[in-house]
Each structure stands twice: as C-alpha cells, then as structure tokens.
Image (cartoon, rainbow, N blue to C red):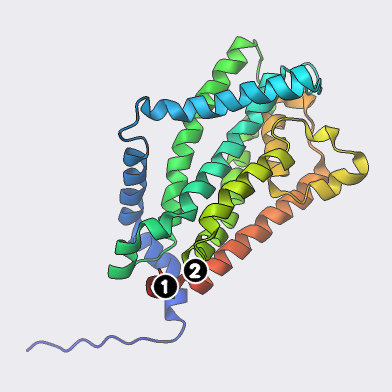
Amino acid sequence: MIEEQVLIIEPGISYKNYWTDIWRYRELFWVLAWRDISVRYKQTLIGILWAIIRPFLTMVVFTFIFNRIAKLPSEGNSPYALLVFSAMLPWSLFTTIMGEASNSLVNNTNLITKVYFPRLIIPMATVVTAFVEFLISFVILLCIMLFYKHTPALQMLFLPLFIFLALIASLGPCLWITSLNVRYRDFRYVIPFILQFGLYISPVGFSSKLIPENLRLIYSINPLVSVIDGFRWCILGNQSPIYWQGFVLSFIMVIFFLWLGFSQFRKMEKTFADII
C-alpha cells in the first residue's frame, strides 16, 4: 500500500528555509559561475588578457594625469603607479560585480521563469567571475611591486580581510541595483554612468589624504573609501596609514548597503518570474 504524501505550505516557511535552499542548490551556483567564466571572453581575440589590460591601462592613464600633469603626491616614497594600482584592484572588483550582476537576472529569464531556486544564486555566481579576474590582476600587482623593488610590509597579512570587505561592499549595491533592474530596465543605462562617476569621486587616482581634513569624515560616507584605503595600507605599509574615524564610518555604510541590498532583493524576489 502506497502512503499518500501531503505537501503543506506554511506562511513564512520559505524565509526560514531560504539559506538551506541556497546550500541545497549549491551545484547550480557552481554551474552558473563556471558558465560565466567560460563564456566571458569567448570569441575574443586576446581572451583573458582583457582582465590585465584594462586595469593596467587605467593605471597608466591615471599616473600620467594625476602625477605627471597635476603633480599630485604619492603616499610617502611609494611609486605613484603602485598607489593607483593598489586602488584599481578593489575598484575593478567592484565594477565587474556591478556590471555583471546588474543584468544577471534579465540574462537568465528562461531559467527564472521555468524552475524554482533561490534567485540570489544568480547574482552571487557573478562574484566568482569577478574574483577570478581579481586574482589575475593581483599577479600584475606583484609584478609592479617587483619592478619597483617594493618590499611588502607585515600589513600584507591583513589583505584577505580587506578582500572580503571589498566583496561585501560590492554585493550590497549590486543586489539592490539587480532587483531594481528587473522592474526598471532604465538601470542598464544608468549603471555605466554611476560607475564612471564613482571612479572620480573615489580615491582611485589619488590619495584620500588630499581631501581637506574638515571634509574627510564626510567623504568617508563612500563605502569604497575604507576598502581602497585598507588595500593601500596593506600594500604600501605605514606610508599609507588608515584614517580610522573615516574607516569606521565607511565600514558602517558597507554594512548598511549590504542590508539594504539583501532586503530589497528579498522583497522583490517573489515577483521576478512575473515581471521579468
């Protein structure tokens, strides 16, 4: 005799089991991540070398404009190119995650409308692609340090913590923008402008020390300030000390945007399949 199985749907049970479902669908996460990596540079002439060329050329341009023309100082005796590239690492990680994740749900319309799984998996999978590019760029950083004979300080041991901080600083805004992009497709045009604007208001091509002291705390509202300053502290050592008051404020903003992004994503997640 076959026992009858009854499926009971209770209010709120999906939220309680949400993280369990993400773990249950972890294989889908890795499949999507590997797919994104394999097709990212497919049918391009130089392939993965784009992950090296883009941040390197940006470093060269910023070094020429801010150091050679504007005569802006570096941190201590460190080369200006190293000052810029140490900021390009977290900035490139942020822009790659934002650019890839913002359209990830729209690009996976067929999957979302046919199969149930936690939708958070899709934008999270793009983080893996961005992190792979980050590791490639990090090799270039080591080459630059070797070229300038820059010996890393003990602070370099804390770099994994700031890499993690860069990831969560990127994840919050990307979840928020990704969920909004499903409903309002205008965001696909707004995002490149936001990233271009953010490049110049973040301390990528210059030291955050150049910000007037009375404005530096306000400037630290930008969550990427703590990330960039942390990277420079790890790579340049005591030549680039951290402004701790601003760091704490910037870290609070990182946590706030992470909460906001996740809350907005979960709020709209139930309607993705209907409006996408």
Q: What residue would you read off at disc 2?
A: 183
Compared with 91, 27 (above or below) is below
Q: Is residue 138 visible?
A: yes
Q: Nearer the viewer, residue 65 or 133?
A: 65
**Can you tell which quarter of the image residue 187 is in?**
bottom right
| Residue at screen point 84% across, 50% down | 218
Neighbor class of circle 1 (other Cα within 10 Å; few <14, some 14-19, many 20+) is: few
Q: Residue furthest right?
A: 214
User: In what element is the residue under mark 1?
Assistant: helix
Taking the view exactly as shown, the residue that stands out farthest to the left is 1
Q: Which quadrant holds the C terminus?
A: bottom left
Question: Relative to 234, does residue 4 appear above or below in the rendering?
Answer: below
Q: Where the N terminus falls, by quadrant? A: bottom left
- Residue found at x 83% / y 33%: 209
Separation of residues labelled 2 and 1 (CA atoms): 7 Å
Q: In the image, what residue type sits under mark 2?
A: Arg
Provide residue 27's location: percent of width, then percent of height. Answer: 31, 54
Residue 66 in the image: x percent, y percent? 75, 24
Indicate whether 268 appears above or below 55: below
Residue position for label 1: 275
Q: Residue at x 47, y 75 (%)?
A: 15
Q: Tell me which label, 2 or 1, sits earlier in the chain.
A: 2
Image point 57% across, 24% down: which residue? 57
Hey, which quadrant is residue 143 in on the image? top right
Q: Are marks 2 and 1 in contact (CB under 8 Å)?
A: yes
Give amino acid for label 1.
Answer: Ile
Secondary structure category for the residue under label 2: helix
The number of numbered discs placed on residues in the rendered structure image is 2
CA neighbours of label 2 inside 10 A, class few (<14), some (14 to 19), many (20+): some
